[in-house]
Image (cartoon, helix red, strand yellow):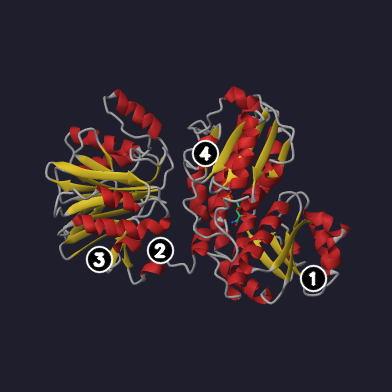
Amino acid sequence: MCGIIGVTGSGDALPVLMEGLSRLEYRGYDSAGVALAAGTQLWTRKRAGKLAELVAAVGDAPARTSCGIGHTRWATHGRPDDRNAHPHADCSGALALVHNGIIENYLPLSDELAGAGHHFASDTDSEVLAHLIEARMAEGDGLADAVRHCLKAVKGAFAIAVVHSSEPDLIVAARRVSPLIVGAAEGVGLVASDIPALLGHISECFALEDDQIAEVRPGSMVVTDLDGNEVTPSRLKVDWDLEAAEKGGYEDFMLKEIHEQPKALTDTLLGRLQPDGTLRLDEVRLDDDELRDVDKVFVVGCGTSYYAGLAARYAIEHWTRLPVEIDIASEFRYRDPVVDSRTLVIGVSQSGETIDTLQAMREAKRWGAKVLVICNVVDSSMAREADAVLYTRAGPEIGVAATKTHVSQLVMLQLLALHLARLRGTMYPDEVRTMVRVLHELPAKVEEALGRDGHVSEVALACHQVRDFFYIGRHVGYPVALEGALKLKEIAYIRAEGYPAGELKHGPIALIEPGTVVVGIATGGHLLDKVLSNVSEVRARGATVVLVVDDGDESTAALADHVLWVPQTHELFSPVVDVVPLQLLAYFLAKARGNDVDKPRNLAKTVTVE
Ligand code: AGP
């Protein structure tokens, strides 16, 4: 996830910027850069790779320059290289800008600006902001007014910091959706995306709210709204230590990432919708005719990414009427599957580097299939080698157990399914629009589900001595059960089996005995009655029953010893919401056992061996 730092009024800005960038490293990044306001031009350096590359490149920086901005980039638009690293400049080189977030309408805006003679030096969405501000300043606006005007024209999410050689002690900062903190004290002004970057420099700072603009100068700052009215931003007391600050105040990265899911979903959906309600999957390099020609789909992945495929299968089949097979990557590549040039193979991977999935994609290409990859890391091996790539925009995931990337994969697969259905004519545009509207309600529903974490922790405490868990579900509830069980195994080290609820009676029910915990996915799908029959079977054998239940469904809740309530949503999207209490349940059970949830034993975040 990108990070921003800016300082003005410091005797020497560069060391403050470099220290701030190193404190933002924990967020993950692929390139970094700084710009210093030095005389009539700005001095800028940016480098792909680790911060050490940038450190090596700033040796000739102008001495004792008191104002500058810095950035660590996590690529979303444009590959991670020197050109696409921030800060971005306008055509004159007098302005430098850093940006976190996604500018949804950057394509039409850049076309317009290019038509007016602006030259773009990168493939990013961010650069458009630099040229928009430049255009406005050319009409006579000062920097802050030009920023204000430009923000009225852009759609999407942003936190920005801008410097201009015409006012070399001023940083203009603004935000919408993406967080930004500003502060001023004792002759210094600071701007940052996160508290860690500011620690030690300032004890009190202010969180900008949406569409607020701060003019930060040495020792002073003014915050205004988009119309130029002065406003008071919210005060923040900075009394965290560095470790707590990196985790955003959460105890662990995993918990932080679980709570970042609404944002991960919002960002993944951002900009995918055309003004007329149709889908824009602009990273798809396969043209519409090639996609229309598809007669079979494979979804291939490992672990949690494989389960995302399993959960999305129902929507892909239902909406596209294409046959869909879901395969574990390490099995797919060795089993001689029936694949030809009309087959679409979708690789799903958080890292884009998992060797099993990467090799499966290579095999699929060799067999002549069209290969599309859904992954979270821009320019990863899979992304580079596939015919097409769709990026989830969950930001870096540090906890080994996948959470926010899983729900983002699900939503991305569902968007792709809607896209295919529209191309194939198996859904009317109105139906697609309705589904897209429901998709956009998911971040709020996930937020609501997260709000019940206190209750989930009580359920965990009630069960934390138990050694055997079963997770059961039918239809879309089945992959949710598998993912819930995997999370429990990974971080709580408790034996857990995910099973199709209807299959239990064909064998595994022999393992149910008094005290076994059975977690059932019992939200309102068309097979709820059948799930409840299976729940009755295990209750009769003494199991402790925990049910994931839609808000208000008291009759289902009555069958449970413990209820995990979730807001109701469309059946095909319900895995996105229903998995949330299961992530939390695994988390609280692991904590109750004193486990390190971020680095569970025997596991690696990215598995690059077969
Ligand atoms: C999930 O919690 C696990 N860490 C693991 O199953 C993971 O999903 C799997 O290794 C695949 O990784 P990928 O998504 O990076 O390809």
Whole-Å distance between the Cαs marked 3 and 1? 56 Å
Whole-Å distance between the Cαs marked 4 and 3? 40 Å
| Residue 15 drawn at (x, y percent) | 23, 58
Mark 3, residue position: 201
Number of numbered callouts drawn: 4
Q: Secondary structure at mark 4?
A: helix
First along the sequence among labels 4 and 3: 3
Give the mark toward the camera: 3 or 1.
Answer: 3
Mark 1, residue position: 543
256 left or right of 91 in image: right
Give the mark toward the camera: 2 or 4.
Answer: 4
* Res. 324 image quadrant: top right
Residue beneath the point at 64% across and 25% down:
292
Mark 2, residue position: 246
Mark 4, residue position: 383
531 left or right of 342 in image: right
Q: Secondary structure at mark 2?
A: helix
**Amino acid beneath label 3:** His
| Residue 560 drawn at (x, y percent) | 75, 68
**Amino acid beneath label 4:** Ala
